[in-house]
Image: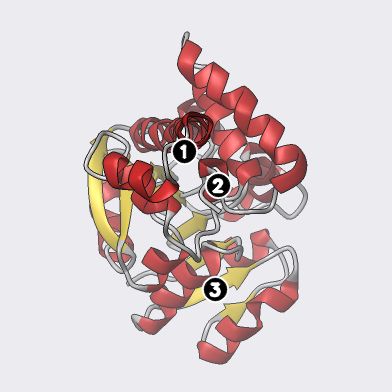
């Protein structure tokens, strides 16, 4: 199994990297705030001083970062990882940045370096339990190479060519975020009509918002309102989505006071 460089140890990146270390893989980690790498170092990972140092001699480089600007900096900025990647290596881009950004990255990678876009469905609890859904897009040979690694994180869903994983993730997140905003509005309507909260929830549970309601009742999630706004903004920029555009305004308004809270705050259940 090749050396794996894991770049980005946020709420999701840390348990994902931990899973790879626990699987006995040779993992090199990097994070902008080095202190976050401490528990992984104690578990057996090597800590690099820069993305470039982490990527040197790595057969697979994984990025799990907050947004397209962070990915750009880590891959192509000073001490960026891309320049150190050798022919035959593969970049696995697991951040939610959209297919356009993925294709832009693919065009700038060194010759002979592959790319798989593989954003995930699930939150911290699923990352810790090897229960993520990994939406993977790329050339078949690259997918074959990285699938044994990605399977340590959960179920790998092969979506097609480069950019298809990022596209599927936008579809999934658009339904979740817009649905959460609709759930919050529905609960406000119930309150205005005098429908008791428990009765409203009982009625909504078996209906089309049932899955969103389950997510809203789940604690421990770290899909923040500001990240939800970022993801819904990416989707709204692809085509005309009037309902999602309206939901985006709701989410952006909520971000003014709840930016770092989990998006369940949108559901107006507390």
Nearer to me, 186 or 46: 186
Q: Quadrant of the N terminus?
A: bottom left
Instruction: Look at the numbered discs 2 and 1 and tell me whether their residues touch, using CB distance below 8 Å.
Output: yes
Looking at the image, which residue is at 28% across and 40% down? 203
Q: Position of residue 140 (x, y in %)?
A: 22, 42
Q: Residues within 10 Å of mark 2 (few under 14, many from 20)?
A: many
Q: Is residue 81 left or right of residue 239?
A: right
> Could you tell me how far apart the alpha carbons at marks 3 and 1 are, in whole angstroms?
37 Å
Residue 28: mark? 3
Label 1 secondary element: helix
Q: Which residue is mark 1?
A: 180
- Circle on res. 18: none
Task: Give the mark nearest the N terminus, 2 or 3.
Answer: 3
| For residue 123, side relative to residue 205 (left or right) | right
Res 37 visible: yes
Residue 90 can be seen in this image? no
> Quarter of the image holding residue 41?
bottom right
Q: Nearer the viewer, residue 243 or 227?
A: 243
| Label 3 Cα neighbours within 10 Å, binned few <14 / some 14-19 / many ≥20 | many
Placement of 64 over or under 248, stated as above or below: below
Q: Return the residue at label 2.
A: 263
Residue occupying the point 34% across, 45% down: 199
Q: Secondary structure at mark 2?
A: helix
Front residue of this view, candidates 138 and 262:
262
- For marks 2 and 1, give the CA distance: 8 Å
């Amino acid at each position: 199994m090749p050396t794996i460089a894991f770049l980005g140890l946020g709420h999701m990146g840390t348990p994902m990297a931990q899973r790879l270390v626990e699987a006995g893989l040779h993992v090199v980690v990097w994070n902008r705030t080095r202190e976050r790498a401490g528990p992984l170092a104690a578990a057996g990972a090597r800590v690099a001083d820069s993305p470039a140092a982490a990527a040197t001699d790595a057969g697979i480089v994984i990025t799990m970062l907050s947004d397209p600007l962070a990915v750009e900096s880590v891959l192509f900025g000073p001490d960026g990882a891309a320049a150190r990647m050798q022919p035959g290596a593969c970049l696995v881009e697991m951040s939610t940045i959209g297919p356009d950004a993925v294709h832009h990255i693919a065009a700038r990678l060194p010759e002979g370096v592959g790319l798989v876009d593989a954003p995930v469905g699930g939150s911290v609890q699923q990352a810790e339990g090897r229960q993520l859904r990994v939406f993977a897009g790329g050339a078949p040979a690259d997918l074959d190479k990285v699938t044994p690694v990605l399977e340590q994180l959960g179920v790998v869903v092969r979506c097609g060519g480069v950019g298809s994983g990022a596209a599927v993730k936008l579809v999934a997140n658009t339904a979740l975020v817009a649905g959460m905003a609709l759930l919050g509005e529905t609960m406000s309507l119930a309150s205005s009509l005098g429908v008791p909260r428990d009765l409203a929830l009982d009625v909504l549970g078996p209906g089309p918002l049932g899955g969103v309601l389950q997510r809203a009742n789940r604690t421990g999630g770290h899909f923040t309102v500001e990240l939800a706004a970022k993801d819904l903004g990416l989707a709204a920029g692809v085509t005309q989505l009037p309902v999602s555009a309206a939901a985006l305004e709701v989410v952006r308004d909520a971000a003014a006071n709840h930016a770092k809270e989990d998006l369940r705050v949108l559901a107006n259940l507390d």
